[in-house]
């Protein structure tokens, strides 16, 4: 049976993996599909953490901070519509694809969110 801490840690690792994938993309044709997939994956995992993980069961004090950063991210950054528009119009425009990827990475790193994710993984 998986403990609460292991469950949270596994989800946070998946978020970091998707973030790493976004950072490693070389901005080639067809990368917009990868960007879309990884972005949706990250958003899904963030929603799982916000909805399913009880902060009282996670001892690490950084978890409440991380939850507030995740909520801020979901409240302030929405790329799905832009990605859909780009898919049909500009999927082969490498500069636009690169810009979208960089904007998503910038949003994920806002308020040092990804650093807090890394630190929390190490603590739990």
Image (cartoon, grey):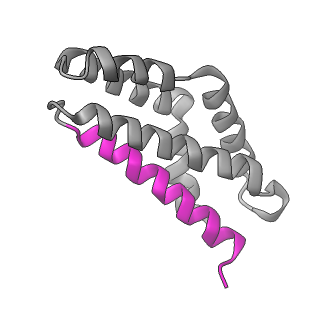
Q: In which quarter of the image is residue 123?
A: bottom right
Task: Say whether residue 62 is visible.
Answer: no
Horizontal and vertical percent position of residue 88 = 32, 19
Horizontal and vertical percent position of residue 33 = 31, 36
Task: Say whether residue 77 is visible.
Answer: yes
Quadrant for the C terminus, please: bottom right
Is residue 22 found inside the magenta-colored segment of the image?
Answer: yes
Work out whether 112 lies above or below 8.
above
Work out whether 100 lies above or below 21.
above
Quadrant for the N terminus, please: bottom right
Magenta span of residues: 1-25
Horizontal and vertical percent position of residue 24 = 24, 42
Residue located at (55% from left, 40% from top): 43
Residue located at (55% from left, 23% from top): 78
Q: Quadrant of residue 83?
A: top left
Residue located at (56% from left, 59% from top): 11
Is residue 45 found inside the magenta-colored segment of the image?
Answer: no
Residue sticking out furthest to the front: 88
Horizontal and vertical percent position of residue 41 = 48, 46
Question: 74 or 37, which is in the foreground?
Answer: 37
Does residue 74 appear to the left or right of 52 in the view shown? Answer: left
């Amino acid at each position: 049976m998986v403990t609460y801490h292991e469950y949270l840690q596994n989800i946070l690792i998946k978020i970091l993996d998707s973030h790493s994938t976004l950072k490693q993309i070389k901005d080639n044709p067809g990368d917009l599909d990868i960007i879309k997939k990884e972005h949706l994956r990250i958003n899904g995992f963030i929603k799982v953490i916000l909805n399913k993980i009880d902060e009282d069961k996670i001892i690490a004090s950084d978890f409440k901070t991380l939850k507030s950063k995740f909520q801020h991210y979901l409240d302030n950054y929405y790329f799905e519509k832009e990605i859909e528009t780009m898919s049909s119009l500009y999927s082969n425009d490498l500069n636009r694809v690169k810009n979208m990827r960089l904007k998503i990475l910038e949003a994920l790193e806002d308020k040092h969110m990804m650093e807090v994710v890394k630190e929390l993984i190490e603590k739990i």
